[in-house]
Image (tube, helix red, strand yellow):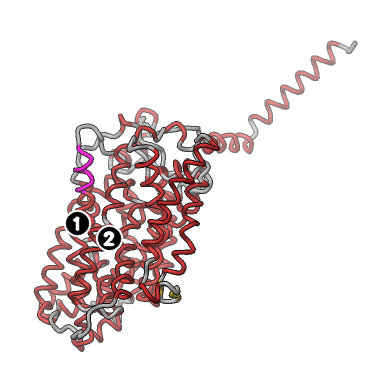
Amino acid sequence: MGDPSRDLERQDDTMSSSSTQDHHPHNSLKTTLVTLLRVEEGEVYHSEPEKNPGWYQRLLDAGVEENGINPVPLEERTSTQYGNLFTVFFTCLLCLLPIPTGMLATLGMGLSLRDASLVIIFFAMLTCIPPAFMGIGGMETGLRQLVQARYSFGGHLVLLPLLLNAATATGFSLVSTIVGGQTISSLNPGSVSVNIGIVIVCLVSFLVSLLGFKAVHFWERWAWIPSLIGIVIAVGCGGKYLHLQQQKTEPATVQQIMTYGCLIAGYFITFGGTVSDYSIYHCPRGVSKIKIFLYMYLGFLLPSIPLLTLGAAIGGAVPNVPSWSSAYEVTGIGGVMHEMLAPAGRFGDFVVVVLALSVIGNVACSMYSVSINLQQLLPFFAKIHRLFWVVVTMGIMIPFAIKAAEQWEESMVNFLVVIGYWAGCFDAVLICELVVFRRLDYASYDHAVWNVTKRLPPGLAAMGASLVSVPLVVVGMAAPWYTGPVAKITGDIGFESAILVTGLAYIPLRWLEMKWFGR
């Protein structure tokens, strides 16, 4: 037997050593960090003002959004300002961005104004449907769009659409900031570079997106008014030249129609990756889903068709108006808008600034969604406040926009053509999951499993269905750097292949996945 006094001494030493380790500053900091970054399974957002420090609560009271990607339970979904779901997208697209997109039809693809207008109207009315339908899910489930995707792609494989969606939102923001930067630069190209204009647009957009959900909706509710007035004034001043279209003696070919239609599809269908981010705090009680759908659908459609058509008219006139052509070579669409407003003198310069700032609504929405996407890359990222990710997003966008501005038109074409392919796969998977397998039962998106990988689907069906469509997309795509053998005959049918093949393949694959894994 041991000496009891020695055993007692050893016990005291052990307790003393343990106490010393517990109070060591390094261990204390490590314990604090582990506690702060620990991710609870099924954790949801709850507003608890009594637990917040005073300075932080003052920020929240001022309108800063507290929540990041955590699901919003029904009791926290209290907003009844459903009109915001119209204005957020209406203002986002009532800017200069659609104009250069429309210009590609006549200036780049050789369509007549009439043919371009018909393609714009048809494909816009068709491809606004999926994102508007998907946006209902944010209000009904309280889940961000890419969190909803976990219920199809799983906790691990969702990383791929997450990265693609972040790249898409970033790409939209890049094009918008370039257009805004060009417009600011057009006031004095010799003194103000496009890069300076890009930085100005990014900084103002950063302030809006930094505050979060309420600030974005507040900005979008009112910012469309000066944008609309500015566009009307520009058309009134310079619209007398829009009739100077290049005369087309032959009707558009199938290849031209399908290729430009795919570009328009890419313009709209990609909102399916972000649309629910703007409805997760809206109350689903006492409001028709059809009403919410129409708010979003018309928010996409109403500003886009006129501005895309205006862009097509400007694109057809640019080669025939020497001052427009020269300005376009230097500062793109911004230079053309400046020339259109030249008859208004100094007031015209003021309107140019208003038009340049019209892209802020678009860029702010993109920054907001990208920051939410970055927060989902790793589990503990959800514990790092959304404000940090907005700063990271701005740090990414500014240098990329400056680089893309060097060949902005080529960058825009490549971006708009390619994004429609993956977005078609993504939208098809989420819509089939909701309609076919969940039978429009939004309550089946259980908040308790949103971040529990072992209880989510493995995602093999979603990824497999998307991959099945890839061969047909490749042979049917028509990009500036590659044209598939089928696309040489039919024009670009990559988008149609992506959404139809993925949707058809997902149904049997998901059925097998549910049978084998039970999730």
Rendered image: mark on residue 223: 1
The front one of 316 and 188 is 316
Horizontal and vertical percent position of residue 14: 75, 23
Q: Is residue 312 visible?
A: yes
Q: Say whether disc 2 or disc 1 marks the residue closer to the N-terminus.
A: 1
Real-space CA distance between mark 2 and mark 1, rounded to the nearest whole angstrom: 9 Å
- Examine the rendered structure and indicate whether residue 185 appears above or below residue 209: below
Which segment is the magenta one?
288-295
Q: Quadrant of the N terminus?
A: top right
Identity of the amino acid at label 2? Ile
Residue 231 shown left or right of residue 143 in the figure: left
Choose top left, top right, bottom left or bottom right for residue 299.
bottom left
Q: Nearer the viewer, residue 17 or 207?
A: 207
- Using the image as rendered, state which of residue 406 and residue 472 is in the foreground: 472
Whether residue 471 sits left or right of residue 78 in the image: it is: right
Q: Position of residue 276 (x, y in %)?
A: 32, 46
Residue denoted by label 2: 360
* Residue 290 inside the magenta-drawn segment: yes
For the residue carrying disc 2, how many other residues have a C-alpha within 10 Å: few (<14), some (14-19), or many (20+)? Answer: many
- Classify 10 Å Cα crowding around label 1: few (below 14), some (14-19), many (20 and above): many
